[in-house]
């Protein structure tokens, strides 16, 4: 079986490719990349590197020839993604692939999450495309928070508009491993998985965990979304990005990421890592 991974030079795609390489010959793994210079290491290991942008349907048609299953890693160009993802899905169908595995967002079709509409539209396209599919709806990467440990070390506080909302985060590597296993194994056709950590944490727990990891007191300071926007703009962020960050926090406050299903740990065959272990690993 030949499996193609799109976005293969991004962090998620790279983790997914590594999982596949543990399970199948490198020559059966196709890495779809837009910049082959970023994939010379993969090509050197025998991975079949093929070049296609999500925007280039003709290149995608060529790149997916002979592929059985496509792991479509959602792109990062917000606003363009429905067309881009549809291009990949339609090219997979045209190439005769049997299934597309798509990385979506938590409860994509039934949520107020500001990022969800493009994912919901992609899921809709996938359902009507006439090709087998599996949807893996990824909760937040724990790395989104690990990346802020230095900032919290300096400030001693986590200012957020997340209220008492909970986040069932998992590491990017765990989520990518789960998606790759779903692509490489049978029994997932037509399934929609809510992938995330086994435990959802709130921001008080995040602050306590950051304190333990950093060895210094870090407190959660809950603020209202409007106040967060003002603070972020004062600290140099542009209005649009600040509004987006606050809107995501408001989504967390209303429970959009409090989605605990055990789907990911069932696919992995082990519990997901704890928040503390994941933050410590990222710190190391
Ligand atoms: N759950 C979460 O917390 C979370 C957080 C961030 C992102 N995400 C989503 O998860 C996806 C994967 O995560 P990541 O950390 O690997 O994201 P990332 O670092 O933003 O990487 C995105 C990947 O998509 C590729 N890509 C973007 N536009 C493309 C295009 N037009 N044609 C072909 N390839 C294109 C990029 O190619 P290059 O390598 O050439 O740049 C890169 O490989 C993201 O794209 C985003 O949709 C989820």
Image: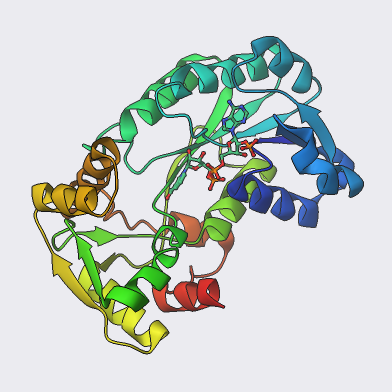
Where does the image place residue 100, in percent across and percent down from the top left?
A: 60, 29
Where does the image place residue 111, in percent across and percent down from the top left?
A: 24, 37
In the image: residue 265, left or right of residue 222 = right
Relative vertical location of residue 184 with respect to residue 1 in this rendering, above or below? below
Q: Quadrant of residue 113?
A: top left
Where does the image place residue 249, in percent across and percent down from the top left?
A: 22, 51
Q: How many marks?
A: 0
Q: Which image quadrant: the N terminus?
A: top right
Q: Which image quadrant: the C terminus?
A: bottom right
In the image: residue 83, left or right of residue 269 = left
Relative vertical location of residue 43 with respect to residue 201 in this rendering, above or below? above
Q: Quadrant of residue 40?
A: top right
Question: Going 53% across and 56% down the picture, which residue do you hit?
Answer: 172
Question: Going 78% across and 16% down the picture, which residue do you hit?
Answer: 62
Let me know if residue 16 appears in the view. yes
Question: Going 87% across and 42% down the picture, which residue do you hit?
Answer: 43
Image quadrant, ligand 1: top right
Let me know if residue 254 appears in the view. no
Relative vertical location of residue 201 with respect to residue 238 in this rendering, above or below? below
Where does the image place residue 203, in percent across and percent down from the top left?
A: 23, 68
Given residues 161 and 198, the one toward you in this image is 161
């Amino acid at each position: 079986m030949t499996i193609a991974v799109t976005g293969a030079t991004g962090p998620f795609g790279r983790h997914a490719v590594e999982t596949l390489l543990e399970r199948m010959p490198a020559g059966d793994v196709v890495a779809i990349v837009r910049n082959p210079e970023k994939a010379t290491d993969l090509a050197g290991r025998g991975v079949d590197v093929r070049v296609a942008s999500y925007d280039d349907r003709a290149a995608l048609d060529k790149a997916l020839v002979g592929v059985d299953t496509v792991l479509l890693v959602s792109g990062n160009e917000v606003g363009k993604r429905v067309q881009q993802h549809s291009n990949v899905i339609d090219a997979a169908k045209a190439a005769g692939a049997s299934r597309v595995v798509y990385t979506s967002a938590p409860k994509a079709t039934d949520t107020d999450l500001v990022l969800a509409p493009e994912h919901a539209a992609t899921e809709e396209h996938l359902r009507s495309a006439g090709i087998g599919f599996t949807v893996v709806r990824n909760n937040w990467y724990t790395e989104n928070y690990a990346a802020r440990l230095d900032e919290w070390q300096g400030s001693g506080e986590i200012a957020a508009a997340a209220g008492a909302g909970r986040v069932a985060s998992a590491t990017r590597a765990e989520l990518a491993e789960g998606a790759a296993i779903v692509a490489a194994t049978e029994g997932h056709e037509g399934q929609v998985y809510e992938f995330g950590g086994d435990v959802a944490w709130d921001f008080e727990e995040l602050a306590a965990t950051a304190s333990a990891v950093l060895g210094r007191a870090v407190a959660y300071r809950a603020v209202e979304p409007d106040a967060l926007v003002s603070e972020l703009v004062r600290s140099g962020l542009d209005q649009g990005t600040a509004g987006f960050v606050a809107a995501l926090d408001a989504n967390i406050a209303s429970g959009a990421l409090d989605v605990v299903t055990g789907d990911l740990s069932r696919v992995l065959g082990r519990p997901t890592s704890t928040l503390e272990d994941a933050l410590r690993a990222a710190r190391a």
